[in-house]
Amino acid sequence: MSSLVIQDLHVAIGEKEIVKGLSLTIGSGEVHAVMGPNGTGKSTLAKAIAGHPDCTITKGDVILDGVSILEQEADERARAGIFLAFQYPSEIPGVSIANFLRAARQARLAEGEELDATAYYKRLYARMDLLKIDRKFTSRAVNEGFSGGEKKRCEILQMAMLEPRIAVMDETDSGLDIDALRIVADGVNTLRGPNLGVLLITHYQRLLEYIVPDFVHVMYDGRIVKSGGKDLALELEAKGYDWVKKDFATATA
Ligand code: ADP
Ligand code: MG
């Protein structure tokens, strides 16, 4: 069992404080949705967890299975089991998905240890079958000329192959048509289970109709201002973010 504990986290970008004392614990087997208006610090939170160099942690801690990860570089955090799915994934021309994933698996091994190619392909094909991905797909270059849906399929396959302990998905639904949205949702629903914790960041409630979260948190002005079960997302959809803003204004007045 894994856990990611975010403790009174404060994150600045440059001189500006953006995350202002956020606490959240994600256990394996749980899907937590973080919702909030634009500009509230959701992406900054995701980047801070993943170790993006733009983020300065000014206070608080992020603890994966009892170990603070704040001193770790982004690649160390990835090896420790943190996976960040991007809103706009990059193209890697000339590198096939199969080779890219193989290199990523190799990077997880200890120095001097060689990836077993047969076992790798066996595992890759098993994961592709699980996710109903066509075998031809992995000979294509990573994200090159991909549709929105194909990019999402590629990302879900990366997640399946890297077997993170905690997956952070930052507005992975934005700008997706319904088919691409279903690919993300089916993928996450297939992979969700006792060994994976998910932090699902989204602006809209729509994704949560397909990936039903265990917990919903509303983020506003760099903090979590409300937490609840899956129904909180519906309440937000009905009342809009102004409702939270008003509540927040009253609470801090
Ligand atoms: P959200 O994902 O909730 O829309 P962000 O975390 O992207 O919010 O942004 C929160 C605030 O931080 C915004 O006011 C934004 O302008 C600012 N911000 C984000 N990234 C940077 C950056 N690289 N440089 C300066 N300001 C930034
Ligand atoms: Mg964002």
Image: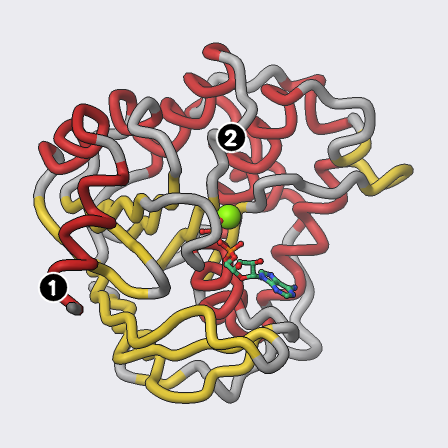
Foreground tag (2 vs 1): 1
Marker count (numbered): 2
Provide residue 78's location: percent of width, then percent of height. 53, 65
Residue at 59 percent of width and 71 percent of height: 74
Circle 2 sits in a helix, a strand or a loop, which is it?
loop
In the image, residue 248 sits, relative to residue 94, either above or below, namely: below
State the separation of the CA atoms marked 2 and 1. Answer: 31 Å
Judged from this view, the residue extending furthest toward the right is 94
Residue 164 falls left or right of residue 99 = left
Pick the front one: 96 or 241: 241
The residue labelled by disc 2 is 174
The response on whether ligand 2 sits within 8 Å of label 2 is: no
Residue 131 falls left or right of residue 101 = left
Amino acid type at circle 1 is: Ala
Q: Name the disc covering residue 120, or none.
A: none
Dividing the picture into quadrants, the one containing residue 223 is bottom left
Q: Quadrant of the C terminus?
A: bottom left
In the image, residue 60 sits, relative to residue 154, either above or below, namely: below
Q: Quadrant of ligand 1?
A: bottom right
The residue labelled by disc 1 is 251
Residue 104 falls left or right of residue 171 = right
Q: Quadrant of the N terminus?
A: bottom left
